[in-house]
Image: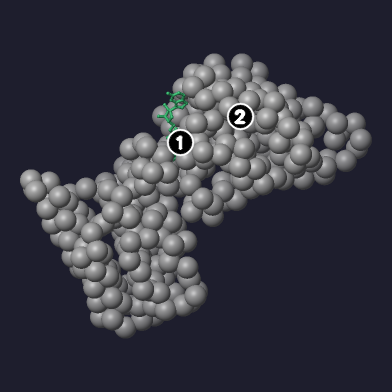
Amino acid sequence: MNARAIAPDVIAAFDEEIRKLHARVAGVIGCVLATTDGRRVSAVVDNEADPQRVSAMVGSIVALGETIGREVMIGRTQFVAVSAVDGMILLQRVPAKRDLLVVGTLARRHTNLGILLHETGIAAEAAARILDDWLGRDLQPA
Amino acid sequence: MSEELKLLFAGAMGAGKTTAIRAISEIAPITTEAANSDHTECNKEETTVAMDYGEITLATGEKLRLYGTPGQARFQFMWPILATGALGVVILIDNSRPDPLADLELYLDAFRALADGGAAVVGVGRMDRCPQPSLEAYAERLAALDVVVPIVPADVRRRDEVLTMLEILLQQLEATWAYDEAIGDGLSGHGLMGAHP
Ligand SMILES: Nc1nc2c(ncn2[C@@H]2O[C@H](COP(=O)(O)OP(=O)(O)OP(=O)(O)O)[C@@H](O)[C@H]2O)c(=O)[nH]1
Ligand SMILES: [Mg+2]
């Protein structure tokens, strides 16, 4: 998959999911959808953070989280969390048939972690359906 | 701890950092490969997104901890993280890329502290298929940049050639340390203040 080659309507569908996630959870101040190799696909960020840089980092951290998870044999990684003084970041893989996308959600301090997890999971599943549909569509004979 | 040296592999996407560490590591290497989504930059299936890690014990008993960087520029934030505590860097160049001399400059600049301290070696790959730029051209560019580091042709798929690069790097390091000790100041060069054995 070449991120540049994602069809415009697919990008629009991803944008819509990212926008919805951002709107639906109070305290969420940014969402990024990126390729597993760290390229920006879709992003909404309220602060000054640069979505391309953040996308690269999301890719790295999900990979590192999964790598250490494998190393210590605790099974498949579900999400990676960063908890900071003024907020938190939740990162997870988009559970599509192919491991091509990751999602990251940035939230203010005091955001409920359970809700954040649940809602990020819903967005990730929606993104997975969009990706699977698109890749399936590509496989259809023209 | 003092017998363990941390070394880094840097260089452009596809130059062979992951391959080099795989070629020589005596432990199963730790890798963080993801599907490559940009085949225009480099036509390979996977790319490193965080780091590689491997280990090798030399005949001298020294244990080397080998860290591979992700090559693509967007992962530059990982480079200083991985460089922390590194005593030397192997800069790998792929001579088939559009502008290998510019690659050299980019990675030298990123690891300038090590290069200036004589703690770097440059390995140029795929010279058989792409003889240009020549090793002389590299030497000229290095001279223009005022850095003194050895340049060798290297096929990262070959264990012996990767080991040769490491040997050259270690010789460089030892020479620098001997010099530092001779002039009684452990602070010159890479500024690692006695971190070496
Ligand atoms: N034919 C040929 N292939 C080479 C040569 N040197 C390296 N390769 C191949 O080039 C590829 C290098 O890929 P990697 O080791 O993943 O490169 P990397 O530097 O880790 O790249 P990133 O992690 O994406 O930054 C491997 O498939 C090697 O087998 C060479 O001299 N000739
Ligand atoms: Mg690599």
Q: Quadrant of residue B62?
A: top right
Q: What subunit carries mark 1?
A: B
Q: Earlier in the sequence, mark 2 or mark 1?
A: 1
- Amino acid at dot 2: Pro
| Residue B42 sits above or below residue A6 on the image | above
Residue B186 image offset from top left, x and y in percent: 83, 40
Q: Nearer the viewer, residue A17 or B95?
A: B95
State the residue at coordinates (45%, 47%): B50
Task: Return the x and y of residue A34 as percentages of the image width and height.
Answer: 34, 59
Question: Tag 2: Cα neighbours inside 10 Å, few (<14), some, or many (≥20)?
Answer: some
Ligand 2 lies in which image quarter? top left
The image shows residue B170, relative to residue B72, as above or below, that is: above
Residue B76 falls left or right of residue A66? right
| Mark 1: few/some/many CA within 10 Å (<14, 14-19, 20+) | many
Disc number placed over residue B133 in the picture, else none? 2
What's under tag 1, amino acid-wise?
A: Gly
The residue most toward the left is A141
Q: Quickly name the residue at label 1.
A: B14
Asked if residue B197 shows in the view, the reply is: no
- Mark drawn on residue B118: none
Label 1 beta carbon less than 8 Å to ligand 1: yes
Q: Nearer the viewer, residue B62 or B182?
A: B182
Spatial separation of the CA atoms under disc 2 and disc 1:
18 Å
Q: How is the image coloured?
A: one colour
Q: Position of residue B150 (x, y in %)?
A: 70, 27
Q: Are marks 2 and 1 in contact (CB under 8 Å)?
A: no
Quadrant in which the N terminus of chain B is drawn: top right
